[in-house]
Amino acid sequence: EHGALTVVPCGGAFIAIGRDPTTAYLRDADGAIAVQLDAAGFIKRIGTLPSVGQSATSVDGVFACGDVTDARYRQAVTAAGAGAQAAIDVDDWLSSAVG
């Protein structure tokens, strides 16, 4: 920010891009939210049964994963794993919708 350079000896550095979920785009023109969010703005996943999938949201056919659903861990590795789960959930949902 000020052009200063500081060397800090360390074994690793972990940078957080942001701590707040980016979910404002889920609001419609009237400000209503289509997908349920928790008090902190994270997308609520309602999937608790194998038939629904862990990444299902309050809107049928909308699945969520990663940092917008994870208020606790917020790590790239957990987001990647959640992305893989969501892909399977979407595939299952599409397969059942097509019949």
Image (tube, helix red, strand yellow):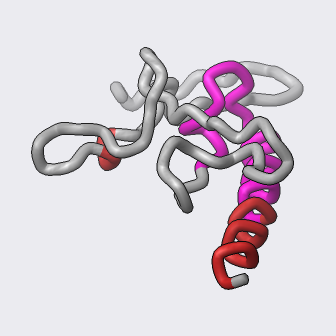
Q: Residue furthest front?
A: 99
Q: Quadrant of residue 87?
A: bottom right
Horizontal arrangement in the rendering, residue 4 relative to residue 50 (left or right)? left
Position of residue 47 measured from the top left corner of the image (x, y, whole percent): 71, 41
Viewer-nearest residue: 95 or 4: 95
- Tell me where residue 98 appears, x and y as whole percent: 66, 83
Magenta span dominant secondary structure? helix
**Image: magenta residue range:** 64-87
Image coordinates for residue 39, horizontal then vertical, percent = 43, 16
**47 with respect to 20 (left or right):** right
Quarter holding residue 22: top left
Rendered-image quadrant of the C terminus: bottom right
Query: Is 32 rendered above or below residue 4?
Result: below
| Image quadrant in which the N terminus is located | top left
Q: Give the x, y percent position of residue 93.
A: 70, 67
As drawn, the residue found furthest toward the left would be: 30
What residue is shown at x 34% (from left), y 26% (from top)?
A: 2
The structure residue drawn at horizontal position 60% and vertical position 54%, both measured from the top left corner, is: 63
Q: Residue at x 42, y 42 (%)?
A: 35
Direction from residue 32 to residue 45 in the image, left or right: right
Q: Is residue 65 magenta?
A: yes
Q: Is residue 30 above or below residue 38?
A: below
- Seen as rendered, the residue at the extreme top is 39
Residue drawn at x 77%, y 36% is 48
